[in-house]
Image: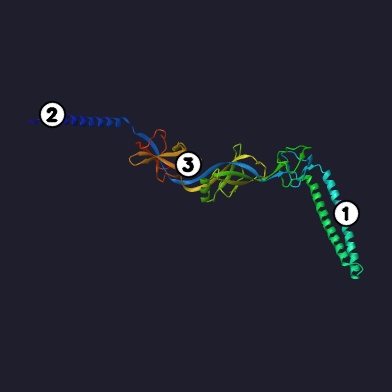
Amino acid sequence: MIKYSTKQWKIQKVLSFLILTIILSACGSQSQEKEMPVIETNFVTLNKNQATITNTYPGMIEGVVNVDIKAQVSGYLENIYVQEGDYVQKGQSLFRIKGAVFNEQVNSSNAALKSAQANLATATLEVEKLEPLVEGKVVSLVQLNESKARYDAALAQVAQAKARLSSSKLNAEFALIKAPVSGYIGRIPSRIGNLVTPSDTQPLTQLSDISSVFVYFSLSEADFIAYLKEQKDGEVIELILADGSIYKHQGKLGFASGSIDRKTGSMTMKAVFENPNKLLRSGGSVRVVIKKVQNNVLKVSKLYVKDIQDKFFVFKLEQGNIVKMTPIDIIGSSGDYYLVKKGLNKGDRIASNRIDVLKDSMKVTPIISESSHLD
């Protein structure tokens, strides 16, 4: 018969208790596994397809020419020949500043010119008279030189008088303000009788040529770099108007700035659109749509993607029928699809249902479809 010491007996009891605890824990975990059902989940296999990438940006319309109409002379506004919103042709009269004072300046300058011309004629005759007398030594050479000096002075006075007359005529012409370009008249803040001057900060009106328009919008630095790297073949530029409709004319894209704004970190872009029906007006708000067709791109339905704090995840099927919550980077969207830049590859299988139930490392019963697109 084997006899145990008291110490051995206590050790034996502890080991027995530990073994019993392990057995019970294993049984408990097995029963829990049996109690947790494996979820049946549909999966799609990713393939590369052709897709149209669509990016939309808010924009502001400006006419190709926006001219501030300002007075070039000071005076009281005598006539206004147009109304706000009128379409005018280049050279059409817009405003008239009371011009009596400018006409008097023209008359005065004209009289001064005639006087200067008369003085020049007198100086010319004097020089012509003295030249033969000097040759005959009747008068001295000093007298002739003095006469020639008076002639030169009279000639300069004529030139000054002509310049003053031209300036007076220009001022008289500036009293009638004409349209420098064809376009639409903006707001007219001044009224007949108001004093207007060239130093006024507010223009008489603004004239906008909208036969074509510029639409200005901004790209982030990252989007701008990506745009430069892309091929431009097949690029389509569209406008979404304020009422949600698509503008029927497509545009052309260009740069409105040569550098990135340090304050905003963005690049200002410019889209040019024809505007034959004058539907687009300066100051209007629109959305610029840039569409680009890309080949061999992974398309994932937006229904299969989980959005958490502006980060995107899908549940990818791994070995052992385990799902892995996988982050993805997207380069844009095409209708109901996200276009994947990073995180997935052709042939990967991702969950197409039970997105809100699945968790990372969960085991599932997969039902696999061989195509991810529903085109």
Q: Which residue is mark 1?
A: 115
Query: Which amino acid type corresponds to the residue marked 3 in the rendered image?
Result: Tyr
Residue 237 seen in this snapshot: yes
Task: Calculate the distance from the C-alpha at mark 1 to the C-alpha at mark 2.
Answer: 146 Å
Circles 1 and 3, Cβ within 8 Å, touching? The answer is no
Q: Which residues are magenta?
A: 111-116
Vertical side of 194 occupied by 273: above or below: below
What secondary structure is marked by label 1?
helix
Q: Is residue 195 left or right of residue 62?
A: right
- Tell which of 324 and 233 is nearer to you: 324
Q: Is residue 120 left or right of residue 375?
A: right
Which mark, by number, is residue 6?
2
Mark 2: give few (<14), some (14-19) or many (20+) Cα within 10 Å: few
- Residue 180, percent from left and from top: 73, 47
Q: Residue furthest bottom?
A: 136
Question: In the rendered structure, which disc, 1 or 2, sits on the residue that comes first in sequence?
Answer: 2
Q: Is residue 129 magenta?
A: no
Mark 3: give few (<14), some (14-19) or many (20+) Cα within 10 Å: many
- Per the picture, the main secondary structure of the magenta-coloured stretch is helix
- Residue 168, percent from left and from top: 81, 49
User: Which of label 2 and label 3 is nearer to you?
Assistant: 2
Question: In the rendered structure, which disc, 2 or 3, sits on the residue that comes first in sequence?
Answer: 2
Task: Calculate the distance from the C-alpha at mark 2 to the C-alpha at mark 3.
Answer: 73 Å
- Residue 162, percent from left and from top: 82, 54
Question: In the rendered structure, which disc, 1 or 3, sits on the residue that comes first in sequence?
Answer: 1
Q: Which residue is mark 3?
A: 338
Residue at x 89%, y 65% (from the top left corner)? 128
Query: Which amino acid type corresponds to the residue marked 1 in the rendered image?
Result: Ser
Query: Which amino acid type corresponds to the residue marked 2 in the rendered image?
Result: Thr
